[in-house]
Image (cartoon, helix red, strand yellow):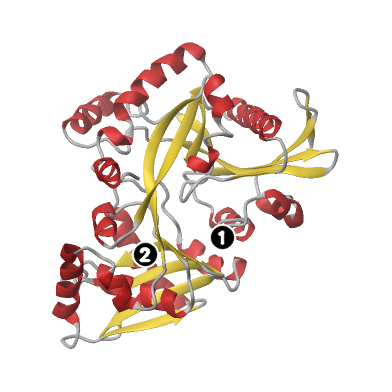
Amino acid sequence: METNSASQLEVRITKRIEEIPRQDWEQVFPNVLESYGFFHTLDESHLPQFSFFYIMIYDQGRPVGATSCFLMDYPMDMAVEGGFRKVLDAIKKFAPRIFSPRVVICGMPMGQGRIGIAGDAGPVLKAICQAMEKIACEHKAGIIGFKDFNSTYNDKFKDLLKDGFFQIQSLPSTDMRLNFAGFQQYMDSLSNASKSGLKRKFKKIDGKVKIDLEIADNIDDGALAEIYQLYLQTHERQDIGMEKLGPDFFKNISRNMPGQIKYFLWRLDAKLVAFSLCFVSEDHFIDYYLGFDYSVAHEFGLYFIRFRDMMNWCLQHSIKVYEMGQTSYEAKRRMGFDFIRLYIYARHRNRLVNLLLKYFSRIVKPENFHPVFIEMDKMGA
């Protein structure tokens, strides 16, 4: 524990969530599924591309702030596509690390960033920034940033923009409010084109092939091996995912988040061909990680079969919010998901370099390359 001289708040930085009393963390951190048990799983999973940190802020012994951070070599050109991608790739052949600076980021590699704040946000955020500066200094990171925070943080983060940070849009998340009595009512809510498209996909499969669904709270070693192979197939096809999980993550998550984990397993002739690892809490459902056997995935429309099965499960269990995260935006738009704007705030610790970075960020920001932002503007999201 150390004293923050600027605000007289006490700041605690740890490298494992278990070093922070759970009651202190949960007293201020937002009531979300990706919390103490989730971070405990990340710590146990030993992800080599990240070093995790946890920051707790106390005011006279009372918890007033809590957040997670991670250290990594950040791929700034992650969202760049087209001809400019070829230019950057050519430059990287001569300077491999030029677009992958070491950074300290408040938030998570996956999912939305969150900060727990009790009381006045200004001093707490200042203390968090100073803690991140300390981490950056110790680990020779040039940039500190806040990743994938939604618009509810815009007002809290105004002071960051006054303090040298710049803001860019990140790739959005997606969710859907489930106000349907059943799947048919959901289908009736879609546009004619989207409804017809889904009907064609279901008609192609229904009655012609038997795909069995199993739903489990945890998995044995045999299922784990099957799941992990499908996860790797999907991970290798992703363009924007930063994290590559090990099998330990899928093994430990059920133990660390009891009652909040569901595995959806689809089998064709007893062979696992698709899975989803989902988080559930009361009326909130998150479709978090998935995997497919791509030798059959497109032929049998597994992406849409799994969506229908999980949507039916959600409706049967009175789920009100179905969250589906990032990627596959065109399919999600057609299925009726809403887009959630997310933002990145960043600052280089060197003021001159920060000016150059701010200019460069305007070139490589995701909205310059990803078509999802065009769709968001059309939808007024």
User: What's the mark number on residue 274?
Assistant: none
Check disc 1 and report the residue beneath it: 33
Mark-to-mark CA distance, 2 and 1 = 17 Å
Seen in the picture, residue 317 relative to 377 is either above or below; the reply is below
Which amino acid, by three-letter code, is at mark 2?
Leu
Q: Is residue 134 left or right of residue 301?
A: right
Query: Which residue is found at the position 40% from the left and 83% from the top?
Result: 214
Q: Quadrant of the C terminus?
A: top left
Instruction: Find residue 290 and name its label.
Output: 2
Q: Is residue 55 above or below residue 245?
A: above
Could you say whether the residue bearing mark 1 is in a helix, strand or loop? loop
Q: Position of residue 174 (x, y in %)?
A: 38, 54
> Image quarter for residue 302?
bottom left
**Quarter of the figure that contains the N terminus:** top right
Alpha-carbon neighbours of circle 2 within 10 Å: few (<14), some, or many (≥20)? many
94 on left or right of 15 = left
Give the mark, 2 or 1, whose residue is nearer the N terminus: 1
Vertical side of 164 occupied by 17: above or below? below
Q: Quadrant of residue 202?
A: bottom left
Q: Residue at x 27, y 56 (%)?
A: 333
Residue that sits furthest to the top in the current view: 352
Q: Position of residue 154 (x, y in %)?
A: 52, 35
Please state which of residues 256 and 51 is positioned toward the viewer in this rendering: 256
Q: Are marks 2 and 1 in contact (CB under 8 Å)?
A: no
